[in-house]
Image (cartoon, grey):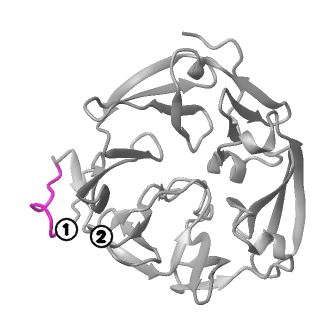
Amino acid sequence: MPQAKVAREPVSFFVSGPEAVWVWEPGRGLIKLTAPFRERNPDGFQLSVDGTTLRYGSSGSALLPDRRFSLDLLSGVETEEPAWPSNTRVFYGDAADECRVEWADWVNHHPTQSIYRLRNAAGDQLPSPFSLPATREDEWIELPTRFTLSTSLDGDTLQFSPDGHRLVVNCTWWGHPVGAIQVFDRTAGLVHQRYGFVTEGSGVWSPNGRKLLGRTISIGRSIEYRVEVFDLERRDATPLPIDSDDYQRSEAPCVGWLDDDHVLLYTRQQRDITFHAFHTGTGERTEVNTFRLPMPSGSMNDLHIAPRVVANRPGALL
């Protein structure tokens, strides 16, 4: 069914609440979308990296698969997509970038392993100990890991690099309280693994694909979270030099990258959301924009950006 109100150009981010979703069109502000809520209770919202498509689901029962839909934000056309089993999650990058993750080996209602299958549109050959060697004709190739995919409220826990050749996974392993990241190359397999660091945000890759935004987790007398940038070339994580306690606490979510040198975080004061850009080297903070939530602050569910729009269009958040 066509949506009455759609964007005239790709959107920068979305904010979801219990009864509607709002998308931000640069220069225009928030646009309310109610179509997904008319006949179902949607969840699992995913905004495409180019800001043109919003995907969401309608949860099934234990015996029925979840229904999935996509809404073209430029035309308002909603399309039903192939359903997922209830133990499966699908992640997207560009049109050819798709990874299906299946939670497996459940113990006391918790999965202890995940199976990752990457769409093989490019005909890559990825060595994996869990399946036969992939051939150029195989539609899917399996990632060489069984670590369990994490869950997150602050962005997808599996994200493709800007060029689509790599992907980063937030994962956990049975019995360990601290997570890790694994970075895979389409042809080389596992190229990076970092314990105690997890990505955070809906645009964790820097536009040049060299760094990741996230937090290092330390467990002592209490659990501490520190915003850090992981440099894939140097293979180390550097704390973001932030002079504000508000932004070091986990209550101030990471969003993504504004450009190769600045990361985005935000704070919320009642219904006011303020984006700030921080220089990764100096910690210099610049206010990008403040907007007012269209719903009570306690009713906000998600805020996710379209990384390519934010990084490539000046003033995307204005």
Percent position (x, y) of residue 41?
52, 26
Where is residue 42? Give x, y as percent: 52, 29
Can you tell which quarter of the image residue 158 is in?
Answer: bottom left
Residue drawn at 89 percent across, 48 percent down: 290
Instruction: Indicate the amino acid at tag 2.
Output: Gly
* First of labels 2, 1 by sequence position: 1
Verify whether residue 132 appears in magenta: yes
Q: Are marks 2 and 1 in contact (CB under 8 Å)?
A: yes
Majority secondary structure of magenta residues:
loop
The percent position of residue 219, horizontal first and vertical second, equals 56, 85
Secondary element type, mark 1:
loop
Foreground residue among 177 and 150: 177
Which stretch appears magenta? Answer: 128-136
Does residue 58 appear left or right of residue 99 in this picture? Answer: right
Residue wearing tag 2: 189
The quarter of the picture where residue 90 lies is: top left
Q: Is residue 122 at least partly visible in the picture?
A: yes
- Residue under pointer 1: 127
Q: Residue placed at 74% from the left, 70% from the top?
A: 261
The relative height of residue 69 versus residue 299 in the rendered view (above or below) is above
Quarter placement of the C terminus: top right
Q: What's under tag 1, amino acid-wise?
A: Pro
Q: Residues within 10 Å of mark 2 (few under 14, many from 20)?
A: some
Give me the residue at 30% from left, 31% from top: 65
- Secondary element under disc 2, as helix, strand or loop, is strand
